[in-house]
Amino acid sequence: MRTKTLLLTAALGAAGVASSMAQTVYSLNAVGYVNISAPAGFSIIANPLNASTNNLNTILTSVPDGTGLYFWDSVASQYNLSTALGGQWFPDNVLNPGDSAFLLAPTATTLTFVGEVPQGNLTTHVPAGFSLKSALAPLSVSVGSAAMGFPQADGDGIYSFSNASGQYSLYTSLGGSFIPDYVPAVGEGFFVLKATPTDWNLTFSVNN
């Protein structure tokens, strides 16, 4: 299928880049910041916090010139590219918690997200087919756990991307669990493949 071909080539030539993405959480209070160490080349990143707006020119202000973010359009089955030039993003797209995008970094860089920890009743729409998603709150727990709240159904697929190998790993939902288990890092995104659209809902508090 065309969509599957686009997914499997989504790394856009990233194979052979020997780096990995790491993350450090400095605060999980109501307001805080998260540092994500992004390698040179491709990785899937997510915005774990809510800023005053979640436009790129607000949340990603210090990235190397030539940095690109590829947003997946699940309706058109294509990527939409934003590029950082001269300290500005063109176009100034939005990256909300719960969504993610492919980052193309010309050099290894640290992304610093500053804002409020998403709390309360959180939701994001998950369309049928492929979409780029992430945890709704800054969590690093099993994607099939109650704490993550992912609305899994048998046959759902999650695809994580490895910068080091330039390849995807597939996790499939069977009997209420993902096989194998998958624990995304804070600020890490992934592809979701669902047969039918649904909403991903989570009630989250930093006090729990």
Image (cartoon, helix red, strand yellow):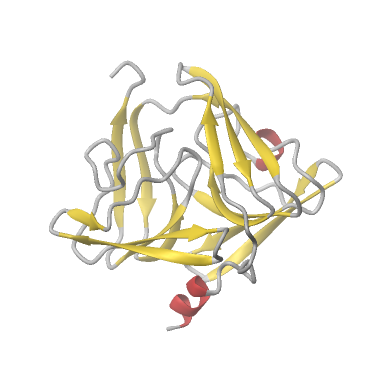
Residue farthest to the right, as pictured: 86
Provide residue 14's location: percent of width, then percent of height.
Answer: 63, 66
**Residue located farthest toward the bottom when viewing the structure as drawn:** 1
Quarter holding the C terminus?
Answer: top left
Q: Which residue extends farthest front?
A: 18
The outermost residue toward the left is 175
In the rendering, at what x and y percent does residue 57 appear? Answer: 71, 38
Q: Nearer the viewer, residue 90 or 165?
A: 165
Could you say which is closer to the camera, residue 25 or residue 91?
A: 25
Name the residue rendered at 86%, 44% in the picture: 86
Query: Quarter-wise, where is residue 17 in the image?
Result: bottom right
108 on left or right of 196: right
> Where's the N terminus, which quadrant?
bottom left
Left or right, 42 with reference to 98: right
Q: Position of residue 49 (x, y in %)?
A: 51, 31
Q: Position of residue 171 (x, y in %)?
A: 31, 61
Q: Nearer the viewer, residue 112 or 57?
A: 112
Relative side of 144 to 51, left or right? left
Q: Is residue 169 above or below residue 189?
A: below
Q: Quadrant of residue 128?
A: bottom left
Task: Name the residue at 48% across, 39% down.
Answer: 97
Q: Residue at x 67, y 38 (%)?
A: 110
Q: How many marks?
A: 0
